[in-house]
Image: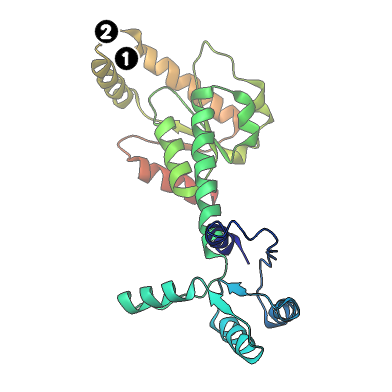
Amino acid sequence: MGDTNQAVINAAMAQFPEITNAEIKRFPLVRDQKTLADVLKQAEDDKGIIITSLVQKDLLTYTKTFAAAHNLKHLDIIETLIDLIQNQTGLTSKEVPGALHKLNDSYYTKMNAINFASKYDDGKDPKGFLKADLVILGPSRTSKTPLSMYLANNHSLKVANLPLIPEVALPEEIYEMDPKKMVGLMTNTEYLQKVRTNRLHFLGLTATASYSDPKRIQIELNYAKKVMTDLSVPIFDITNQSIEESANKILESLSL
């Protein structure tokens, strides 16, 4: 019996507070007839009620037959609901045991990846680089953060990113990284100036700031390219690329 049954049984038993000596025996991960037979024999010896959530038809049929032959009460919690869904949709159950747990595991893996991307965004904590599936390098406004979040949300990858700024020394952790777990993002001066100018306008700031100055941008691009080359990381041009397009190119290149 798994968590599905346990929750239902607890809810039912709560309606009988006078029952204080009931023993609930759980047998999770019953996947074959031999294991099931051993469990059912214990139920027979204890004269207990058999409650199951078996999605495999052969095991469910075996349980029903055993219960009838030994005059035992049996309820399969999930059978009726599966039948209703099948009748309503015309679809057939996959009969995959533990499917809910697999779904939950996938969900939690994704959420952990999203939290990781948020925690280690923009070089906040370089210690996270060594825990990452991928570290993205690039000048400011080259889509590092949206790419990190996209890869986390759609591919459950733990991604950190680091802005490359000429005046800021690289963290030591970068030199400890496997180059195969790093990528660099690059573009041209004109494109990056346009992106940064739009960003400044959005923030209500003047476009004359050095942040959007072409000469400053070229200095940053030259520095970023040198860093990426020195680290032997693959470089991806994000000019006029959507986040999805850039992500797919990275995934294909690195076989992630």
Residue at 48%, 42% in the rendered image: 152
Q: Nearer the viewer, residue 229 or 86?
A: 86
The image's mark for residue 212 is 1
SS category of the residue bearing label 1? helix
Which residue position is annotated with label 2? 208
Residue 175 picture location, percent across and down: 66, 27
Residue 228 picture location, percent across and down: 54, 29
Along the horizontal axis of the image, is 83 left or right of 26?
left
Res 210 quadrant in image? top left
Identified by mark 1, the residue type is Ser
Q: In the displayed structure, would residue 245 be above or below residue 187?
A: below
Res 29 quadrant in image? bottom right
Position of the N terminus by quadrant: bottom right
Q: Are marks 2 and 1 in contact (CB under 8 Å)?
A: yes
Identified by mark 2, the residue type is Thr
Residue at 68%, 64% in the rendered image: 24
Residue at 53%, 72% in the rendered image: 96
Using the rendered image of the protein, determine whether residue 55 is visible from the camera's viewpoint: no
SS category of the residue bearing label 2? loop
Res 131 quadrant in image? top right
Q: In the displayed structure, would residue 205 be above or below residue 50?
A: above
Within 10 Å of disc 1 (Cα), the crowding (few <14, some 14-19, many 20+) is many
Q: Nearer the viewer, residue 247 or 190?
A: 247
Q: Nearer the viewer, residue 156 or 26?
A: 26
Residue 189 picture location, percent across and down: 34, 22
Along the horizontal axis of the image, is 242 left or right of 32?
left
Mark count: 2
